[in-house]
Amino acid sequence: MNKVIVIDSAKREVYEAHTETYKDIYALLGESVSCFACPVQFNDSDSLFVDDEGLYNPFEAGYMFPDWEYPVCGNGVISGSDDEGETADVRMSVQEVRDSILWVDKARCEAWRNHVLGSGGGFRVYTF
């Protein structure tokens, strides 16, 4: 069982949870999630899992971290990893995430989604 940190963008909550298999990550990300991605690896080998189709699936809000150019729409799960790339206990603390997360409301997430999808889906630098 691995300790993870859950980012619930609709409730603007960050909390600790536990996972046993990848299926638990799906459940923590949300019921409409059918594919997740790991687009961010933090300096301490913790990784952020997000809905890979987050711009297409329903969401209530999103979040960013300092120096990010655009928000993640929906929820997130931060997990640790070991030397072989397998999931492990998260190294960051819940408080570290709470102190650095920037909440993004639904309207701003929708503006980002419309910008990306309206441009043919290609990611360009977009100051948010």
Image: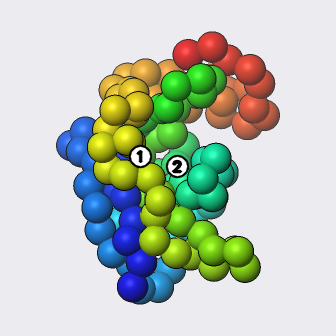
Residue, disc 1: 74
User: Which residue sits at x=65%, y=51%?
Assistant: 41
In the image, is 1 to the left or to the right of 83? left
User: Which residue sits at x=30%, y=43%?
Assistant: 95
Tag 2: amino acid:
Gly
User: Which residue sits at x=37%, y=52%?
Assistant: 93
| Circle 2 crowding by C-alpha within 10 Å: few under 14, some 14–19, many from 20 | many
- The picture quadrant where one finds residue 24 is bottom left
| In this view, 8 is above or below 112 | below
In the image, is 112 to the left or to the right of 15? right
Q: Nearer the viewer, residue 76 or 83?
A: 83
Label 1–label 2 contact, CB within 8 A? yes
Q: Nearer the viewer, residue 21 or 117?
A: 21
User: Which residue sits at x=34%, y=32%?
Assistant: 99
| In this view, 55 is above or below 37 | above
In the image, is 14 to the left or to the right of 69? left
Tag 1: amino acid:
Gly
In the image, is 124 to the left or to the right of 90? right
Residue 105 at x, y percent in the picture? 34, 26
Q: Is residue 31 visible?
A: no
Residue, disc 2: 54
